[in-house]
Structures are given as C-alpha cells and as structure tokens.
Amino acid sequence: MFERYSRATPLGAYLEEGRRFREEGFIRTDYPPKRDEVLWNPKIMRMPREELEKIKTQRLKAIVKWAWEHSEFYRKFWKSKGFHPDMIKTHEDVVKIPVLTKKDLRADLQKNPPYGTIMVPELAKYIHFVGATSGSTGMPTFQGWGRVELDYFEEQQARYLWTFAGVKPGVVYANYLNMSGFYSWGPPLVETAMWRCGATAIAGGGETFFTWKDRHMLIMKLWKVDVFATTPWLHRWIGEQAKLEGWVTPFKVLLLHGGAAAEKTKEKLMEVHPNVEKVISVWGTTDGHMAIEPPDAPGTLVFWEDTQIFDIVVPGSYEERPEGEPAGQGERGELIATLLTHYTMPLIRYSLGDYVKNEFICDPTPELGITHCRFAELIPGRVEWMFKVKGKLLFPIVVENAVSQIPDTTGAYNIVVYDDNMDKLKIKVETRKPIPPPPEYDKEAREIIARELGLSPEDVEIEWIRPGESVWKGYKLQVFLDERKK
C-alpha cells in the first residue's frame, strides 16, 4: 500500500512516514483480530506514559518542521507572529505556537480556493477524500485527506469501536451520521473502519431520516442492528417512536455523536431502548480529532495521544497575544488542538471552539488499562453556544438535563437566545399534553428547569409545542436558536 519513493520528495517522505507508522505497530495491519481479543491495539493503547511523551515530542517536532518547509501558509503565518520551529524542544512547547483560527483559514481559502495555501502542493494532487465543516457561520473550511491520514484515522476509529462498542465479526453497525455535504465521518472513513473490525456496516445517513423514516425504521427492525451511531436527540426520537409503534429497538450499544448528552438524557435513552447495554459519548471534529468515553471510566473522554495534542486557553485571548493565555488548572476555556499525523493539510494549534475544563486524567483506566490521557469531563459544547440569563453563564446541555426530567415530554427543545445577557430563559419544549397544558404542569416544568439552572421559576418562560414541531437541522436538534442581531 505504501510504496517506497525517494524521501527527497515530499510525496516520498510522506509515504515513508505512513509505512513507518505501520511497521512500528501504531496502525494494526492483521485485521480483524480474533474475537476474544479485548483491545484492538494493546501495544499502543497501553503504551507506557514515558514512551507516549517521547512519541508526542518526536511527532510535534516533525509536523512543525514539515509545515514550515512545505506549507506556504504556515511559513508566512508563523513568521508574522514571531514563531520558528526551533522554539519547539518538547511536546509541552506546543503552547508557544501561534493559535490558528477558522477566520485565518477562511481568509486564505477566499484568496486561494479551493484549499488555500495551507495544503502541501505536492500532496494536494493525491488527495483521496475531502471533508468540510458545516459552514453554518460562513464559508466552510475544507480538510484534504491523503492515504496516510485515512489509514491512521481508520485505525483510531477501530480502537474504540472494537474495544468499547464490541464491533466485531458478526455485529451489525448502523452509521446514522451525516453522509452528505463533505462530512468526513461518513462512509469513506467510518465504514472502512467497520470492515477492519470485520463487522457488517449500514451507512444510513442521519440527514435523510425524517424524509424516509418508515424505510429507516424498517431497516433497523429487519437487520436487528446491534450498534447504532447518531446524535443523542435522534436516538431519543427513534426510541420514542418505536414505543408508539409497539416494537422494541434491537440496539445493544448506542454511540452518541454530534453533541454531548446530559446525564438525564442518557437515562432516558436506556428507557426507550430497553436492550441497550452501553451508552457511549463520542466527540469528534470534521478535521479528524476524536475523544471517546471509555466504558470503564464513564464521564471522561480518552484521546489517542499518538495522533493529537490538546491545550486550553482563555477564550479569545489569542487576539491579544498570538499563543493565547493558558486557562488555569481546573478552569474551563477554549480547546486548541494539534494533529500529529496529518501531513497533507497540517492543522497545528488550531482553535476548535469547544469549551472544556483544563483538567486531564492520565492514570490508566481501571479495567482496560488504557494509558492515554482523558478529558476529566465530557465536552459540554462550543464557546459560541454559551449564553447568559440574569448574569449566569449557561450551556444547552444543562438545560437539556432539566428538560429530560419534565414528564410527558419528548426531550426535544429549542433555546431562544435574544440577547447577550437575557433577563429570562425562553425555551420551546415538546409535550404530549394538550396545548396549552394545564397551569400546574407549566408551573412544575418551570420549577424543574429553574432548580437545575439556579434560577427562579419566574425567570423561565416556556412555549409549549407539539411533538415534531421543534427545529432540527438534518439529524441534529437545533438546541440553540440565535435571534441576536449579528
């Protein structure tokens, strides 16, 4: 697969790196494993911390040097910010690199379409797959995947699918993520990881669910899907609908993508899907980052340190200084990420915009013994999703936890954000009660929400809507309706 070319050329050096990843065991090649193997890649997943630290340092130095030498964008960007690759001595020096934002990428894209100058020109002609962000805030940003990036990403997927979700030969897996719009976790990546695991893969396409819901529900019944991957909200909708139709979903494992699920939401999912044994949160980005909730360390997210480095800064602080202001230990801030194995289009110290606590757990997980570090909490959302009510900073996931406790609701809701600091929480909630519901029902619901959010019931205003009337965007519930003036 990875032919030998002269390392004197960018293509040769790139392919040689991919071959070395395989030879050193970072990418498993003898797949699928025997069914009784617990870990997909025990050598790497249980690698001693000292070795992991060395790997991170080696790879950070290598990718920074590569970007400086082969990407016109990085040379100009870093020179303008006073950064040089020689400043990197260990992986901890990643915080010296200037922060890259989507705004920076979009400016380059507009001047130099379609990929901008960030792409390594000699590798751009060998791209196998193109992924893109949603573009909900303007022009989408694109990520080019060559064979090395694809090979490693499929390895990363297989690690958690085999080990956490039990995706093995004979298991039926249904991928109901987005399959269109350049979405990078669609068939070219996730389904190929399924084949490495030896599983049967169904590429459902979550964005088509409501158009063909009868067809999709039939497929789930006929194929007796074991592992089902989609958003927490679509998981809930399908379970509720199956109950109304008088049948029980066959799923044993639910993989939650597209947004963190509140704890009460997970409990509801277990109720509406009675056969479920595991509910696992999966966080990821279009560019190839990922972190997964290990079954033996629930509430945390493990990430593969041989492929990525994370650090956390005070939101927006890189506008004052290029490298940003590091968030304090235990404080929440903006997530900054570096991909260590993406050479075609390097993404180094890139602002992902997610809001997360600056706390990592690096002790092995208690049962599986995975040594890679974990986020100490699930990632609650993006910085741009934060909103204030009576000066109190809130996130949709906190509201969702409250809505899930209200009787006779579907779990679907839309938060209406009309100002930067609102005097009331305005929210639309689906209910099975008559519209309008009894006053005592509305009062109880406002009390539940107020208690969870630390507000007064008078600070909560609910617009009750019928099942199916909430706003969705494809397979994602549009939890955040932004009515602020832009």
Image (cartoon, rainbow, N blue to C red):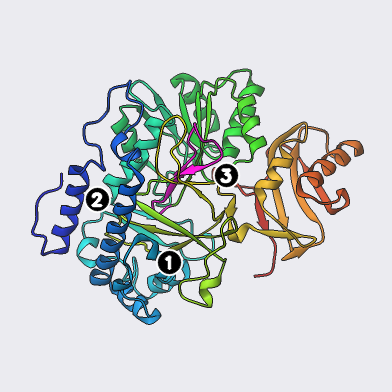
Name the residue type under label 3.
Ala
* Residue at mark 2: 148
The x, y position of residue 243, in whole percent, is 64, 22
The x, y position of residue 139, in whole percent, is 47, 65
**Front residue of this view, candidates 114 and 235:** 235
Q: Is residue 405 visible?
A: yes
Check the image and report above or below for 215 versus 415.
above
Label 3, label 2: how many angstroms apart (C-alpha)? 29 Å
Q: Residue at x 15, y 47 (%)?
A: 2
Name the residue type under label 1.
Val
Label 1: element kind: helix
Name the residue type under label 2.
Val
Q: Which mark is residue 95?
A: 1
Label 2: element kind: helix
Magenta span of residues:
286-302
Q: Is residue 474 magenta?
A: no
The x, y position of residue 246, in whole percent, is 63, 18
- The part of the image, by quadrant, that contains residue 425 is bottom right
